[in-house]
Amino acid sequence: MISKRMKKTFLTPLGKENPVFVQILGICSTLAVTNKLENTVVMTLGVLFTTMFSSFTLSLIRKFIPSRIRMIVETMVIATFVIIVDIVLKAYIPDVWKQLGPYVGLIITNCIIMGRAEAFALNNTPGLSLIDGLASGIGYSYVLLIIAFFRELLGTGTLWGVQILGDWWVNWSIMIMPPGAFFMLAIFIWIVKETFMTEKKEASNE
Amino acid sequence: MNSAYYPIAVFFAAIFTNNILLTNYLGMCSFLSVSRELKTSVGLGIAVTFVMASTTVLNWLAYTYILIPFGLFYLRYIVFIIIIAAFVQLVEMIIERTSEGLYAALGIFLPLITVNCAILGVSLFMVIRDYSLLTSFFFGLGSGLGWFLAILAMAGIRQKLVKAKVPAGLEGAGITLIIAGIMALAFMGFSGMITIS
Amino acid sequence: MKKDGFYALRIYPLVFMLMVTVVCISIVTGLFLSTKERVEANEGLFLRKTILQAANIPYPDDFREVTALYEASVTEVSDGQLYYRVAQPDGSFTYVVPIEGAGLWGAISLLVGFTESLDELTGIGIFSQNETPGLGARIEEEWYRMQFVGKRGPFVLVDEGMADAPDEIDAITGATRTSLAMRDIINEAVTLGPAIVRGQ
């Protein structure tokens, strides 16, 4: 049974309250690896896993957490899930793990995870928190995947390491360099905001 | 790598050629939200630099003398983040009791720092790159100053930008990111300034 | 009020934190121990693959086949300094020497392969590096590694995609420091490698 509340919990972070382009949260750790699609996919899956299960776990024990040490308990739980991601990656896809370097560990300080725990998981049931975590994670992931798609395609003419664009294509090296990520994200936010804002204006005119 | 100049080279590289904010995108959250005003940016910048330089040293000691000898290096994420959180809390308590002026200036920024990814990031980079204690300290200090420099420049630009006309969709985060992109381009001009060898 | 009591304010948070810590650390430790063997096997496999890369011997994906191929063709020699002697499919012998040098951010450790006459490279393999992901870290990519095959050092750098002469190697766009570091490390290897093999 899918209740209305569940549906709402799931859909809000995907659009109107998307953590990346509305709240601009949590881009730090992943933006750095968006110059390759493969790394971005692995990284966003790691974030997704951590957000979901840390929200779920914290919601399970929410009634027992003493409020004074709330933050440190949250950090502890999040760090545990991040270490799980790190160990699993190291054991099963060592090549990608090596390329990601310290960025897996930096998922701990991803503001989205802590933010969702504080704002949602501590006041809601485990089931809803899991859905909220999943939705926030997806809302975050797809934005970064779109950025990674364009950065890798324009920057090296490849996708997932496979040559897509032919010899005629001159690589935009700037795309895989640091400024490329800033420009791509800004352009993306611009396009999304323009679309959303015109919708809002129309709605208020009615 | 073992030359006496190496820590100094890492120090300058961390400020200019490989600025932690502009090339590794660490500490973006507070960068985007706090860079509106020059005064607050200075406060946050000083606090970040101080905490970064101190925690890299503490984390280095914990890693080298506790985690490695006991084979517990896989716990480093938990240990590092807790050392950072505890250190920030401690500093907050000390300056609250000793200096009212300093507390008024920096106090509100300290809680923000624990979740600043740049702080944890510097400690993780230090471990992966196998730095010595001295190099780690200079790396932490340089990264902090680099972050400070970036947020200071951004706040200066954004204060002037208040009067400028920006397309509605780009207001706030959008334009800040574009400026950060241009700053990153400018900072790329520093590459070649320092040779680490 | 009981809520403000000594127990609720001091003891309970401490006990709770201790419990959370114990649970978290046991989970992580359990997972670490259960994957330890696999991680070590991965590392061993990775070294073998890197040596085969440096010797320019194509290797299969399968774990067992790589091990079999490695054991059939590579012999470790450690009189003085460690190097590897590789039996090529055509019957000739080539050599692979481990070399380490400073990159932009930390040590780059790599394996450099030499032909039997020790004057040409058979290739290189990157064992570990800490360069910037997507920029300097591209030294691990195949196109970069393959450009050393059959080349003769000492090398000079040219822009990415322009290398032509036997002593030219492509730099990586946006990773000038890493490219320079690689040039220096490999140029050093070109003189150091043969000396190690000859036992000097």
Image: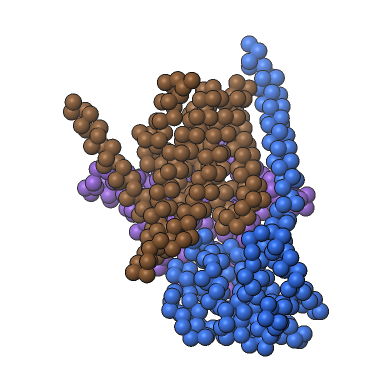
Give the residue at x 64% y 64%.
C60
Vertical side of A98 occupied by C193: above or below? below
Position of residue C27 in the picture relative to residue B24 (left or right): right
- Rendering colour (chain A): brown
Q: In the displayed image of the protein, which residue is found farthest to the right?
A: C79
Give the residue at x 57% y 49%.
A104
- The colour style of the image is by chain
Position of residue A86 in the picture relative to residue A118 (left or right): right
Residue C117, by quadrant, is: bottom right
- Give the purple chain's letter: B
Position of residue A6 in the picture relative to residue C29 (left or right): left
Who is closer to the viewer here, B170 or B64? Answer: B170
- Measured from the top left, where is residue B59 in percent x and y? 65, 50
Position of residue C163 in the picture relative to residue B141 (left or right): left
- Measured from the top left, where is residue A108 in percent x and y? 56, 42
- Measured from the top left, where is residue A149 in percent x and y? 41, 53
Who is closer to the viewer here, A88 or A184? Answer: A88
Vertical side of B58 occupied by B183: above or below? below
- Give the blue chain's letter: C
- Measured from the top left, where is residue C175 in percent x and y? 48, 68
Res B62 visible: no
Q: In the displayed image of the protein, which residue is found farthest to the front?
A: C90
If the image is split into quadrants, where does the N terminus of chain C sit? top right
Give the residue at x 30% y 46%.
A190
If the image is split into quadrants, where does the C terminus of chain C sit? bottom right
Give the residue at x 40% y 51%.
A147
Vertical side of C175 occupied by C166: above or below? below
